[in-house]
Amino acid sequence: MNLSATERSTLGRKPDRAATDRADLHAVLDEGWVCHLGVVRDGAPVVLPTAYGRDGETLYLHGSTGARYLRDDELPCCVTVTHLDGIVHARAVMHFSMNYRSAVVHGVAHRVHDPERHLHGLRTIIEHLTPGAWDHARRPSRRELAATAVFALDLGEASVKTRSGPPSDDEADVTADLAWAGVVPVRTVTGSPEPAPDLGGHHRLPAHLDRAGDPVDHRYG
Amino acid sequence: MNLSATERSTLGRKPDRAATDRADLHAVLDEGWVCHLGVVRDGAPVVLPTAYGRDGETLYLHGSTGARYLRDDELPCCVTVTHLDGIVHARAVMHFSMNYRSAVVHGVAHRVHDPERHLHGLRTIIEHLTPGAWDHARRPSRRELAATAVFALDLGEASVKTRSGPPSDDEADVTADLAWAGVVPVRTVTGSPEPAPDLGGHHRLPAHLDRAGDPVDHRYG
């Protein structure tokens, strides 16, 4: 199934960097922890980092019911998730670049009022951070649920853009053998879990976290 | 010197996470490689990842002169840079969180027309990626310069938000010793430089890149 091709989700620049498969979109979204949520407030753009989770073709977002930008039931927004994979050093400064994968979702997020779906959205967001976490920790209280707004955003209008591989220098610069060129890889890695200082001494690291301390970069491995 | 406190740069939620020193703002911006640039197009927000560079109280952005969103000389925008430092596992699902540092800059970016400042802006962006890169690679040609728009954004209206440390659970959940709680650290690291496949055999790694292959995480060290 192809990604949609509305005007704003069709890449104007470097269309060769566009992916068209929904599996690519899901992969980029699933690998990230933070999205950048763009909204319009008083006519001006505002971009805030926030957590999210994906279930099928729905992206869930949450926030305090007290947050100014979550006041309405409909939130026109743009959600962008970016993975930086490398710094591209070219022979010419104007060919410096970055290797990356990014997903951009356009749409209107709708506030979730149905209690079951509200809980499902929260679960999706927590499980996105670390699968297994939802069943490990205390479930939300009625008061906590009331304080937290959940929004659902359909993934129907989205684009994926990636750059990978070595620098794309002009042939003349390559032939002239001007300078060192290549890629410095960039990775996002997790370290060993650090127990809370007030954690009871008998707690062992739960099973759903037992890979987090691997020396192996398990998110890029 | 304090960060400005206009209405939109004053944190509505969790004001205890706000930093008020310009040094904090500069540190967050200087450590990042990618910013998320928010603009309004046809009334809707659009968030795109892009490179940037800082010189004093000015953030420089660049893009193709053919890019739709860079058509005008004035670009109302929001630039956000986020560093993810850890996933916070709490005893209760609603206290799961992330440790992070983020900078949000509001303002109007102005297209740079002065040739000297245009070049300075590009240099600032390239040097931000890797200090030393500008003097290493071929400088822009007249044609390359004409194809690249540079925008300058004043850092006057900005906010910094950070979260660090262990989970903030309810005292009752801590006392009940409900579940494992702690932080899984997240780091962004660079790997060994990978030379371009068509690089001449005599090139050694340039001095400004000689730390990139360190086993030590030099951006978080």
Image: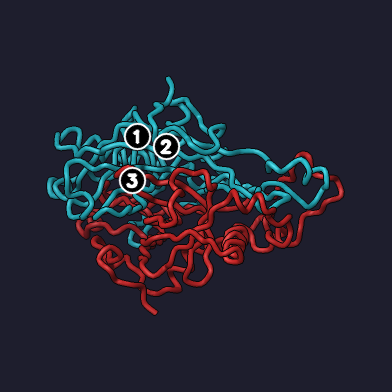
Chain colours: A red, B cyan
Identify the chain of the residue marked 3, using the numbered disc in the image. Answer: A
Q: Is residue A208 left or right of residue A217?
A: right
> What is the distance, in whole Å, between disc 3 and disc 1 at their CAs?
21 Å
Mark pair 2, 1: CA separation: 7 Å
The residue drawn where x is 36% and y is 60% is: A166
Q: Circle 3 sits in a helix, a strand or a loop, which is it? A: strand
Residue at 30%, 40% in the rendered image: B134
Left or right relative to A82: residue A138: right
Report the mark closest to the observer, 3 or 2: 3
For label 2, count other residues whose C-alpha is less than 10 Å away and answer few (under 14), some (14-19) or many (20+).
Answer: many
Residue A146 vs A7, above or below: the answer is above
User: Label 1 belongs to which residue?
Assistant: B54
Can residue A163 be seen by looking at this rendering? no
Q: In the image shown, does B160 or B7 lie closer to the viewer?
A: B7
Report the side of B147 relative to A62 (left or right).
Answer: left
B190 or A194, nearer to the observer: A194
Work out whether A7 lies above or below A40: below
Residue that label 3 marks? A45
The C terminus of chain A: image quadrant: bottom right
The kind of residue tagged 3 is: Pro
Along the viewing direction, whichever of A2 and B208 lies nearer the viewer: A2
Residue A210 figure quarter = bottom right
Q: Which residue is mark 2?
A: B29
Q: Secondary structure at mark 1?
A: strand
Provide residue B69's location: percent of width, then percent of height.
23, 52
Q: Residues within 10 Å of mark 1 (few under 14, many from 20)?
A: many
Residue type for callout 1? Arg
Q: Residue type at mark 2?
A: Leu
